[in-house]
Image: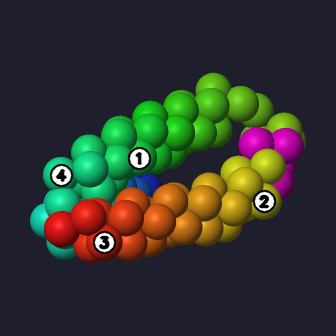
Amino acid sequence: MDQETLTLIGAFGGGVLGVLGGIIGTWCSIKNTNGPRERAFVVKASILGWIGVVSFLTALWFTPMNYQVLLWLPYMALLPFAARAWNRKQQQIRAEESHSA
């Protein structure tokens, strides 16, 4: 096989593995919820997360290589804050549901 074919196989395989990892992670997050309110929150947050990542990747696809760093910087800066906010909110809902049960 030539280099171009190997590159295409790697790109396709990496993309498929990435999506499968996202699907498995989403499924596990929803499965491991404790109550209905927490599950509803995780479903909504997961949908929002998928929309955000797909939007980011779409923007990367259509942005010239020289300007892609302008997309990566805010993405890398905001992602940890979004994950922390998600975790805090989920813990808050989990605590509220455990007290009311």
Q: Which stretch appears magenta? A: 68-73
Q: In terms of sequence position, does the residue under pointer 1 or pointer 2 come before the other?
A: 1
Q: Is the residue marked by circle 4 packed among few (<14), some (14-19), or many (20+) residues within 10 Å?
A: few
Q: In terms of sequence position, does the residue under pointer 1 or pointer 3 come before the other?
A: 1
Marks 1 and 2 sit apart, C-alpha to C-alpha, by 18 Å
Amino acid type at mark 2? Ala
Q: Which residue lies furthest to the left in this view?
A: 31
Q: Which of the 4 image quadrants contains residue 68?
A: top right
Q: Residue at x 18, y 68 (%)?
A: 101
Amino acid type at mark 1? Ala
Q: Are marks 1 and 3 in contact (CB under 8 Å)?
A: no
Marks 4 and 2 sit apart, C-alpha to C-alpha, by 31 Å
In the structure shown, which secondary structural element does the residue marked by tag 3 occupy? helix
In the structure shown, which secondary structural element does the residue marked by tag 1 occupy? helix
Q: Residue 36 carries which label?
A: 4
Measured as percent of width and height from the top left, residue 71 is found at 76, 43
In magenta stretch: residue 41 = no
Residue that carries the numbered disc 1 in the rendered image: 45
Q: In terms of sequence position, does the residue under pointer 1 or pointer 4 come before the other?
A: 4
Q: Is residue 26 above or below residue 50?
A: below
Residue that carries the numbered disc 3 in the rendered image: 99
Residue that carries the numbered disc 2 in the rendered image: 77
Amino acid type at mark 3? His
Left-right relation of 57 to 27: right
Q: Which residue is drawn at 44% across and 71% down?
A: 91
Marks 1 and 4 sit apart, C-alpha to C-alpha, by 14 Å
Q: Residue 59 carries which label?
A: none
In front here: 42 or 56?
42
In magenta stretch: residue 70 = yes
Q: In terms of sequence position, does the residue under pointer 4 or pointer 2 come before the other?
A: 4
Marks 3 and 4 sit apart, C-alpha to C-alpha, by 14 Å
